[in-house]
Amino acid sequence: MTILVKKADHEELLCRCIPRSIVRRLHRGETVVERYNDATMCFIDIVSFTSMSGRMEAHEVMEMLEVLFREFDKLAVKHNCFNAETIGDAYLTISGGPGGEDGPTGAANIAAFSLGAVDAVEKLEFQGGKKIMIRCGFATGPIVAGAIGTGGLPKYTVFGDTVNFSSRMESTSRAMMIQCPHKSYKLLRESSEFDFQLEEREEEGEVGIFVKGKGQTLTFWVKGFTSAGRDVETSGDLVGTRDVAALGTDLVLDVETLCLGSDGKDKSVSFQVGACVQEK
């Protein structure tokens, strides 16, 4: 009985690191490397976090991040995103990959998650009446993913230029706004369920924004959407969230945490305690 319990605990731990479908393949002794052609990845960052945290006690920073990331975790589950926790103050999500969604669905999931995140932050107030602001950005493209490592705790890792590009979309975004490139824009326009409010970015009469490694890039602001004939209320650049029932999903994602590798490269992300995909 003790052996069975320990085996079950080990299985559950693995499922908190990597998707359950990949755990099954690992048990069969397979080398797991997958390519997602149209995965959408989102980065969220707290504006001026370094200076803000320098004025706060360590426990206050942790309490603030705990409240914030709990909200993001709930939104990630609601919108069928494989959700990350914290890389410093950054939060990352992916859809259109591990969950098996197609490109337009993955992009729509991430856009809805991002809009919900901005809306949630607008409503949050921390100790002493503190308010925070976030930047959001996402991009769509090919991503390679796989389970790396042995010793009973392999890491689910995703890497590729799309990871880097999505980070650039966040870093060049604005406070409380969501930016995406043209490919993501096109996929959102293809959504059959949702009508997204998208606005071409223009700076001082020039369309788009300069992105390191990409040059001048056509990008768009994601400002809202309508769902199933119902208008989603907006407040400035903010919008509410949508019903999870509209997604029609067969998966429930419960992701604990994510962290970047320690080599400083921003093109790879290692899920050390990640998602458990449970069948209904």
Image (cartoon, rainbow, N blue to C red):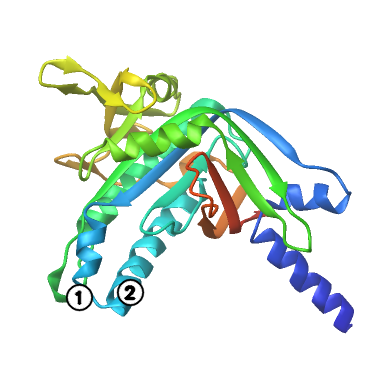
Q: Can the viewer see residue 250? A: no
Depth order, front residue of 189/7: 7
Give the image quarter of residue 130. Answer: bottom left
Question: Crowding near pointer 1: few (<14 within 10 Å), some, many (20+)?
Answer: few
Q: Which residue is mark 1?
A: 127
Please report contact status of discs 2 and 1: CB closer than 8 Å, yes or no.
yes
Name the spot of residue 224 as percent of width and height, x first: 27, 35
Q: Work out which residue is located at the far left of the displayed protein and give it.
A: 204
Residue at left offset 33%, top offset 20%? 215
Residue at left offset 76%, top offset 69%? 10
Q: Is residue 101 left or right of residue 190?
A: right
Name the spot of residue 160 as percent of width and height, x first: 56, 33
Q: Work out which residue is located at the far top of the displayed protein and give it.
A: 206
Q: Earlier in the sequence, mark 2 or mark 1?
A: 2
Question: Crowding near pointer 2: few (<14 within 10 Å), some, many (20+)?
Answer: few
Name the spot of residue 90 as percent of width and height, x first: 38, 53
Name the spot of residue 272 as percent of width and height, x first: 60, 59
Q: Which residue is mark 2?
A: 63
Q: Is residue 61 above or below residue 182?
A: below
Query: What whole-number distance in Å separates the C-alpha atoms at marks 2 and 1?
Result: 9 Å
Residue at left offset 30%, top offset 33%? 179
